[in-house]
Amino acid sequence: MRDKPVAFEDVNVVPMDKERVLRDQIVIVDKHRIAQMGERDKVKIPEDALRIDGSGKYLMPGLADMHTHTWGEADLLLFIANGVTTIRNMWGSHRQLAWRQRIANGEMLGPTIFTAGPLVDGSPPVWNSSKVVVTAEEAEKEISSEKDLGYDFVKVYTRLSLDAYQAILASAKKFGMPVAGHIPNAVGLERALEAGQNSIEHLTGYIEAIQADDSPVKNRFDPQSRWKIIDYADEGKIPRIVAATKAANAWNCVTLVVTQKFVAAEDAGRLVEDPRMRFVPPDYLASWDPSKDFRLKDMTALDFKRIRRADEMRARFTRELHKAGARILLGTDTPNPFVIPGFSIHEELQNLVKAGLSPYDAIKAGTKDAAEFLHGSDDFGTVEVGKRADLILLEANPLENVGNISHPRGVVVRGRWYSKEELIRMLDELIATYAITQERLDSLFEPLSSSGDGIDQLHSSYWIKSTDTLLGEERFALQRSQAGRILISSQALMSAPPRINSFLMRMELNDDWTPISLRFESHTSEGTTKAKTELTQGRLKVSRNHPQVLEFEIEKDEAEEILLGSPHIASFVPIIKRLRLLDIGQTLNLTMMKLETEPELDVVEVRLQLERKSDIEKQDKNGRTRSFRQYNMTETRSNASYTGSLLVDDMDRMTLLERAEQMGLTRFELAEK
């Protein structure tokens, strides 16, 4: 049954086709579209319509956040509650493809999603788990794959070589894929403009492009030099760079808000106290610690002062580009630290106005212009008959003050009306799912059992944390069959508001702890995904079935002994058996074929090196002093590297596994209940 038509009566329409207000209009929404609009005597309201009193109120198009990294389902409601009805997601995976389809089908509430494929970078990449492209062959293979999977555009990044960048743009042109992203260090702004990159994010490359000819940090891209470039800016070069941008018809998504929130650890406290932080999912908050953020943790007070000066320079570039007629897009780069999904769009609107845009032009950067950039002008971006019904109802005129948009009276999403009261209720319900209770977890755990002849040998439970924030729990059972085979069954439950995701693993090993097979199954907002790895006489077979991807199989010979693994701590049980043989100071090198779930389900080859350190003694909860073996761990793969540590008690149980991520720590702690 379709939603009823919605009739806005006597409302002032801000159509955003030009700077104007249409007074006392009747707007009829029906079947996801704007069906009628005009004065009362020219529009007939359907008898079954939901009537909304628009007297003295203003109706405008929904906003587009043109730079997001939307990994959590909670983000979707946060966007909608703030009038963000379209997003351009800048690092995509099968998750966003699944959400995009479910939203379009009406199965999930959220903004219309345009998404890049995986972030494409050089070697080594800035961000772990990026797609590394070095050769022209790799470029064509990656862009062809992204096109086939249904991604909307390609995202390029900082460490691409000039040859790889040029090959990516050539392949993107061949497959009809726009290119957006950072300006790679090896390319530079002017070559990127000449090459035809469609959009530039965060004004990357602009301050570098106005370096003084005698700048001592010119063409240096180490972290220390990166912050110093503002000290050597030659402002006389700005007009030429602005003119080159205009001539290239390149767009800039300036995201001024993101670096404004790059602050020292001692200043982060005032941001945490913002009452809007209650809407931020716990895993985001856990990663918003400047002392653990790999980009910020080693910065000095002087470096942060330089960031503030660079903020001023980016605002100036925004003003000069706009004055010259170059195109600007509204975006936030959420969820970077303290850039809250949805809420931050209102900060960025204010930033654009402060930079010199009129309220109309600032709003246009996230409505009409966003639609034009996305080749969607026939579908959204203005209030016109036939357009998709994504609308915001306001108490006051946004053309007088963009701050008026931050308190919507209600939002229409694909023709469905959500009042302010309904949105507040939905947000409260969402926040209630942030807390992880033992009762909630217990209700979702499944019995861990294997074959009927299995004999239990070990049951363990581990808290899963991001630094000190509890995100979930894993339970596993180890059993030995009468045939001598070892069976490890594991379930991990992870907070993914408003739901809890479930991940199941079953590993089978020979009696000497060599792997036979690993089965994996996940139940998330994307649907159910299954994968299996099997190892037979040195031959590896991998199969995967994902809701948005055709099932595929890989077979290859392995020249060395390998382990099978997954994100579950239970994967480390066979490793613990090997670590028994190490003396203090000795190292063990292992190769694991590991099923990963982030940023998407994949199988990666991981090189592990574990070094035994001196034993330590600690008191347990009963006050007894016990001995623990400790190991340092290095994990290396083609597009990522991690360091960590492992603690094993005198009963040969893992008590702590800790891995340093780029934005914090992942911890598995033995839960002695």
Image (cartoon, rainbow, N blue to C red):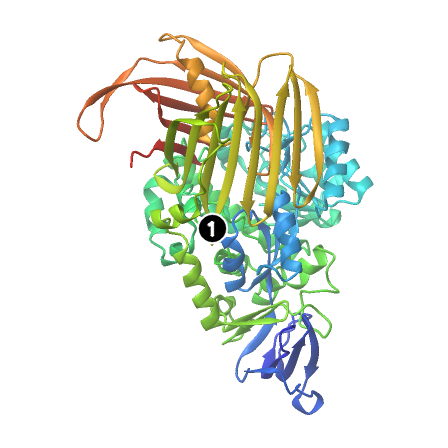
Report whether residue 489 is seen: yes
Asked where in the image residue 516 lies, by quadrant, the reply is: top right
| Disc 1 residue type (three-letter) | Val
Q: Would residue 5 appear left or right of 655 to someone viewing this image? A: right
Looking at the image, the residue that sits furthest to the bottom is 41
Looking at the image, the residue that sits furthest to the right is 174
Asked where in the image residue 267 lies, by quadrant, the reply is: top left
| Residue identifier under label 1 | 339
Which quarter of the figure is the N terminus placed in?
bottom right
Q: Position of residue 39 (x, y in %)?
A: 67, 87
Report whether residue 592 is seen: no
Q: Position of residue 422 (x, y in %)?
A: 47, 70
Q: Would residue 137 appear left or right of 3 to someone viewing this image? A: right
**Camera-side residue of 548 and 509:** 509
Asked where in the image residue 62 lies, by quadrant, the reply is: bottom right
Q: Position of residue 139 (x, y in %)?
A: 74, 31
Looking at the image, the residue that sits furthest to the left is 623
Count of numbered tags: 1
Q: Position of residue 627 (x, y in %)?
A: 26, 18
Which quarter of the figure is the C terminus placed in?
top left
Q: Residues within 10 Å of mark 1 (few under 14, many from 20)?
A: many
Position of residue 133 relative to residue 12, above or below, is above
**Camera-side residue of 11 and 580:** 580
Position of residue 461 relative to residue 409, above or below, is above
Q: Residue at x 66, y 85 (%)?
A: 46
Position of residue 167 relative to residue 397, above or below, is above
